[in-house]
Image (cartoon, rainbow, N blue to C red):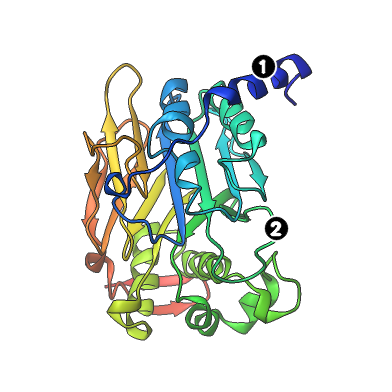
C-alpha cells in the first residue's frame, strides 16, 4: 500500500502531467483499438517508466485521449513471480490513480513492467480495463494484452468446449455477447501452449496460422504481448508496434504501440507477421512467425511431435 504522504506527493506530481494538445503528425497511427507497452530488465529504470507512461509527448497518458475506456499498469517484482496490476475505468489522462500507479511502479525496479490503455470494441465497456488478462498455468502467472479486433467469433470456434468449460472468461458473466474477444484470444493461446507442452513460439505459430486460415488479411488485427514474468513475447500484425533495446546504464528492452517521443529515435518498427522475444539481458530476437507454422503433426493429450 502507498502511504498517505507518498500518495499526496504523487497526486501533487499530477499537476505537472497535464496532457498537451496533440499534433496528429506526431502519432504513427491514431486508429488503434488499444495501445500497449511493456518492458523487461533486471531492474527497469524509474525515469524510463515515468517518461514513457506519463511525460513524453506520445506517452500512454497522452495517447489515452484516443483510447479512453480505462487503463491498467503493473509489474513483476525482480525475484517474485506474482504480478501486481493496477486498473482504472477512467481515461488515463484524467485519472490521478493512473499517475499514482505509474509512480509506484517506477520505484520497484521491476523485472517486467506492463501497461495498456483501452478503446472498447467488445464486451463490457463500463469496467476497469481488463487488459492485461491474468491466468495461472503451469506454475506461472501469465499476462497477455491485445491491440486489435475481429477475433472473437473465430477464437471462440477454436477453443475446445471442454477447455472453455474449465477456463471460462472472467468478464461478461454467462452472456456470450458480453465476452471480450481479447480474453478469448488469450484463452486460445493458453490452450495451445498446453497442447504444445509450453513450447511458446511453436504454440504461438500454431495460433497465428490458425487465425490466418480464418481471418482475411485485411481484417487481421492481432498485436499482443505475452509474458510469464521471465520472458516477454510480442507479435505484430495490423496496427503499428515498435521495440527498442537500451544498454545505457541498466540494460532493458521495451515494446510499444507508439514510440513515446515526437520522433522515432532508437525505436525499431516491427514488421507485420514478426514475433519478437525480449529478455532481461539479451538483444531482442526478431523472427518471422511463419517459421513456426506447421510444427504440430500429432497431439495426444499433452504429448506432441514437432515437424
Q: Quadrant of the N terminus?
A: top right
At 68% across and 53% down in the image, what residue appears?
128
At 32% across and 56% down in the image, what residue appears?
29
Residue 291 lies in quadrant: bottom left
Q: Quadrant of the C terminus?
A: bottom left
Give the class, few, some or many, for how many residues have Cα within 10 Å of label 1's Cα (few <14, many ≥20). Answer: few
Q: Position of residue 54 (x, y in %)?
A: 48, 32
Above or below for 111 versus 257? above
Give the class, few, some or many, for how many residues have Cα within 10 Å of label 2's Cα (few <14, many ≥20). Answer: some
Residue 227 appears left or right of 28: right
Residue 182 appears left or right of 47: right
Residue 173 lies in quadrant: bottom right
- To which residue does mark 2 refer? 127
The one of 112 and 260 positioned closer to us in this rendering: 260
Q: Position of residue 51 (x, y in %)?
A: 42, 28
Q: What element does badge 1 sit on?
A: helix
Above or below for 46 versus 306? above
Above or below for 124 versus 213? above
At 27% across and 34% down in the image, what residue appears?
245
- To which residue does mark 1 refer? 9
Q: Which mark is residue 271?
A: none
Q: What element does badge 2 sit on?
A: loop
> Marks 1/2: CA distance?
27 Å
Q: Quick check: can you spot residue 297?
A: no
At 69% across and 65% down in the image, what residue appears?
171
The one of 251 and 258 positioned closer to us in this rendering: 258
Residue 288 appears left or right of 304: left
The one of 233 and 25 positioned closer to us in this rendering: 25
Amino acid at each position: 500500500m502507498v502511504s498517505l504522504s507518498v500518495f499526496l506527493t504523487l497526486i501533487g506530481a499530477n499537476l505537472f502531467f497535464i496532457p498537451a494538445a496533440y499534433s496528429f503528425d506526431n502519432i504513427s497511427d491514431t486508429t488503434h483499438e488499444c495501445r500497449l507497452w511493456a518492458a523487461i530488465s533486471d531492474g527497469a529504470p524509474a525515469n524510463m517508466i515515468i517518461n514513457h507512461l506519463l511525460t513524453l509527448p506520445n506517452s500512454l497518458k497522452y495517447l489515452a485521449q484516443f483510447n479512453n475506456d480505462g487503463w491498467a499498469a503493473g509489474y513483476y517484482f525482480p525475484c517474485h513471480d506474482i504480478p501486481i496490476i493496477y486498473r482504472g475505468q477512467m481515461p488515463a489522462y484524467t485519472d490521478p490513480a493512473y499517475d499514482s500507479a505509474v509512480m509506484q511502479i517506477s520505484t520497484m525496479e521491476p523485472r517486467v513492467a506492463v501497461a495498456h490503455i483501452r478503446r472498447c470494441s467488445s464486451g463490457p465497456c463500463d469496467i476497469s480495463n481488463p487488459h492485461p488478462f491474468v491466468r495461472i498455468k503451469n506454475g506461472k502467472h501469465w499476462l497477455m494484452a491485445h491491440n486489435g479486433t475481429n477475433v472473437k467469433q473465430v477464437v471462440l470456434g477454436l477453443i475446445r468446449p471442454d477447455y472453455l468449460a474449465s477456463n471460462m472468461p472472467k468478464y461478461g458473466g454467462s452472456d456470450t455477447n458480453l465476452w471480450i474477444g481479447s480474453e478469448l484470444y488469450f484463452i486460445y493461446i493458453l490452450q495451445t501452449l498446453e497442447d504444445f507442452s509450453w513450447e511458446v513460439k511453436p504454440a504461438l505459430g500454431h495460433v497465428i496460422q490458425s487465425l490466418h486460415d480464418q481471418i482475411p488479411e485485411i481484417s487481421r488485427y492481432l498485436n499482443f504481448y505475452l509474458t510469464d514474468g521471465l520472458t516477454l513475447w510480442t507479435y505484430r500484425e495490423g496496427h503499428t508496434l515498435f521495440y527498442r533495446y537500451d544498454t545505457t546504464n541498466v540494460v532493458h528492452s521495451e515494446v510499444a504501440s507508439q514510440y513515446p517521443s515526437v520522433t522515432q529515435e532508437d525505436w525499431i518498427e516491427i514488421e507485420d507477421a514478426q514475433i519478437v522475444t525480449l529478455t532481461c539481458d539479451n538483444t531482442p530476437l526478431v523472427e518471422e512467425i511463419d517459421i513456426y507454422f506447421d510444427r504440430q503433426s500429432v497431439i495426444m493429450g499433452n504429448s506432441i511431435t514437432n515437424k
